[in-house]
Amino acid sequence: MGARKPLIAGNWKMFGRAADLAEIGVLAETIGAAAGRIDILICPPAAYVQSSAWQNRSGPILIGAQDCSPNGADAARTGEVSAAMLADAGAKYVIVGHSERRQIHKETDDLVRQKAEAALSAGLIPIVCVGETQDERTAGKVADVVGRQVRSSVPSQSGAFVVAYEPVWAIGGNSTPTLAEIAEVHALIRETLAGQFGGQANDTRILYGGSVNPKNAGEIFTVAGVDGALVGRASLKAADFSAIILGHPAAV
Ligand code: PGA
């Protein structure tokens, strides 16, 4: 098994305007040599993918998108953006199946898998999000829910993809699972992937997401099986996001 290169990704959601894209340039200057040892990704809103990819074309920050169409080919799908277009625009990754899309936009595991497969076909690396709600955790269904989401949402063809474990109840708040709970779910995800992909599962990066901030990131990164983070609010400001990145053991 090759060592998995850590990935720390920022999900800007529907925040950040054109003027805020300068934060990415500031981030690039602050993280220094860490960028060689950790993949650093910012996923701005779709409207800014092309301009931010252009501004950062000489590195070190990678640019990604937050969603893509399940349609691989050009098609009459008003409002949709295909993975091929995002790749043309300079994106390298795309988040699919974020809980906000699963909940607000009623996306199913099947749709998320189609999006992940469209991303892979276009040469993008999909970051497939999974995670249980508070009710599901209270009912003791974490393994059932996350196991099902992984089995049904990751692409069926082999190829590079990333899984992000984002407990829905930890997103946008102040609470995170305990380190032991994070370790437990990451192990479950890798075991599930091994059932589908055998030894290749060891190459898949599994990120933790949900209320990661400069204070808690360092200890989360020490948890076995955590290959990086998917960060919402704390990725919007270069000062916060660089503090998270520089807190990774691989950064120094
Ligand atoms: P948060 O969001 O870091 O603001 O909790 C994480 C996410 O939704 O990816």
Image (cartoon, rainbow, N blue to C red):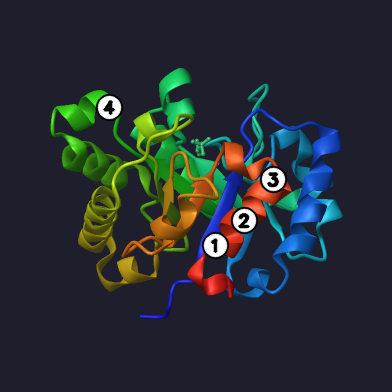
Q: Quadrant of residue 190?
A: bottom left
Residue under label 2, please give it.
243
Identify the mark at residue 86; answer none if there is no mark. Answer: 3
Please, which residue is most extreme toward the left here?
140
Q: Which residue: 47% across, 39% down?
A: 211
**Residue type for callout 2:** Ala
Secondary structure category for the residue under label 4: helix
User: Looking at the image, is mark 3 or mark 1 earlier in the sequence?
Assistant: 3
Q: Quadrant of residue 103?
A: top left
Residue under label 1, please give it.
247
User: Looking at the image, is mark 2 or mark 4 earlier in the sequence?
Assistant: 4
**Residue type for callout 4:** Gln
**Residue type for callout 3:** Leu
Above/below status of 235 relative to 190: above
- Viewer-side label of 2, 4: 2
Identify the mark at residue 134; answer none if there is no mark. Answer: 4
Q: Position of residue 179 (x, y in %)?
A: 30, 52
Disc 3 to disc 1, how far (Cα)?
30 Å
Q: Position of residue 160 (x, y in %)?
A: 47, 63
Within 8 Å: ligand 1 and the Cβ of disc 3?
A: no
